[in-house]
Amino acid sequence: MATLKTKASTASVSTFLDSIQNSRQHEDCLWLLAFMKKSTGETPVIWGKGMIGFGSYHYKYGSGAEGDWFVTGFSPRKKDITLYFSAGLHTMQSLVEKLGKVKTGKSCVYITSLEQIDKDVLKRMILHNENALKKIIKEFR
């Protein structure tokens, strides 16, 4: 069975964020850090080499593959900031449509600036993600 490469680490979140050279992205990430910490009540943890996750859960697939992952998080990228929602965006499509100018994947939202999103909607998405993931986990146990 292959080992998951992306795991929680003991790396410093502050040191990681201080390494962001783009000043606007750095400020946006500091805001997201405080906002997600307050919204989730969880301590931020570096996952892999560049994702900041809040909360965690253990999963196990029918294939036998299993691991741990964060519930909600974000990661600064070269052109944008990726927001992660482990329950998947399909569980909150109406909220995604109200978020603002974003691009999306299956469980990710890509933003270029916090100025382009509705922060109240973001908070609702974070809370919805936590509740939806709890429901998904409960169904599979």
Image (cartoon, rainbow, N blue to C red):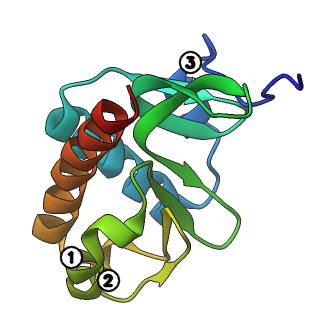
Q: Name the residue under label 1.
A: 95
Numbered tag placed on residue 73 in the rendering = none
Q: Name the residue under label 2.
A: 116
Residue 131 place in picture, x, y as percent: 19, 44
Q: Which amino acid does label 2 sit on?
A: Gln
Residue 86 place in picture, x, y as percent: 44, 48
Quadrant for the C terminus in the image: top left
The part of the image, by quadrant, that contains residue 120 is: bottom left
The residue at the far top in this view is 10
Residue at the image point whose x is 26% and y is 36% from the top:
134
The part of the image, by quadrant, that contains residue 37 is: top left
Please, what secondary structure does the residue beneath circle 3 have? loop
Numbered tag placed on residue 12 in the rendering = 3
Residue at the image point whose x is 24% and y is 41% from the top:
135
Residue at the image point whose x is 56% and y is 73% from the top:
105
Mark closest to the chain's N terminus, 3 or 1: 3
Residue at the image point whose x is 63% and y is 23% from the top:
67
The residues tagged by marks 3 and 1 sit, at their Cα atoms, a distance apart of: 32 Å
The residues tagged by marks 2 and 1 sit, at their Cα atoms, a distance apart of: 15 Å
